[in-house]
Amino acid sequence: MIKINLLGSKIEQNPYLVTFMVTWIVGLTLFFLGCIFWKISLSSNVKSLEEKNNNLKSQLAALEEKTKEVNKLNDIKEELRGKLKVIDILKKSKLGPVKLLDNLNIALPSKIWLESIEESNQNILIAGKSLDDPSLSLFMKALEYSPYFSNVDLNYSKQFFMDEVKIKDFEIKANVSYSAKEDDNSKLNNKEKK
């Protein structure tokens, strides 16, 4: 009789093959776990970057609003600066005639009296009477030293007699500046003291 071994002979297993298979399965498992962790990490990074992006967008919007407010404030500042300039000009225009007449009064010698003063387009005509030529000359020099008058010139001078007194009728023209500085006014006062 013939015996058939259905179970077969015992096959020897190669220990390197088992190690290779275990290493390969562990490596593949670690690779998949690494991919999963990497995907989770990327998702977390994407979420954090999206949050940062949203925060930066909100900060940018807030800064744009502040920039608009600053621009509005700068426009208001420039408008106020313009108004202050106008106010300054109006103050000078308001005080200018007073200071001009004060300088005219300071420059006026005792032997001269004025009959009329006409001002137009920053030019002035002064008409009056004088008892002598030196007083008229002194008056014109004092006007020249004043910061409010320039280009002082004698238009005419006529002599006549009134009750046997020799009198000079005169007219002086000059340019007028209402924006003279107060420091310049001291020149006239110092000249008068001499």
Image (cartoon, rainbow, N blue to C red):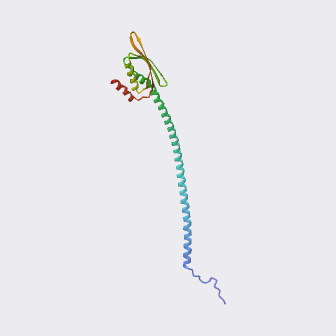
From the viewer's perspective, is residue 138 above or below residue 88? above
Q: Nearer the viewer, residue 37 or 138?
A: 138
Extreme residue toward the top, this view? 163
From the viewer's perspective, is residue 143 above or below residue 168? below
**Spot occupied by residue 169 in the image (x, y as percentages of width and height):** 43, 16
Q: Which quarter of the figure has residue 143? A: top left
Q: Across the whole image, how many numbered discs are drawn on residues?
A: 0
- On-image quarter of the N terminus: bottom right
For the question of whether residue 100 can be seen, the reply is yes
Residue 144 in the figure: left or right of residue 67: left
Residue 9 in the figure: left or right of residue 114: right
* Residue drawn at point x = 50 percent, y = 38 percent: 74
Q: Nearer the viewer, residue 115 or 80?
A: 115
Q: Nearer the viewer, residue 115 or 134?
A: 134
**Spot occupied by residue 52 in the image (x, y as percentages of width and height):** 52, 52
Residue 97 in the figure: left or right of residue 16: left
* Residue drawn at point x = 56 percent, y = 71 percent: 25
Q: Which quarter of the figure has residue 103? A: top left
Q: Nearer the viewer, residue 87 or 69?
A: 87
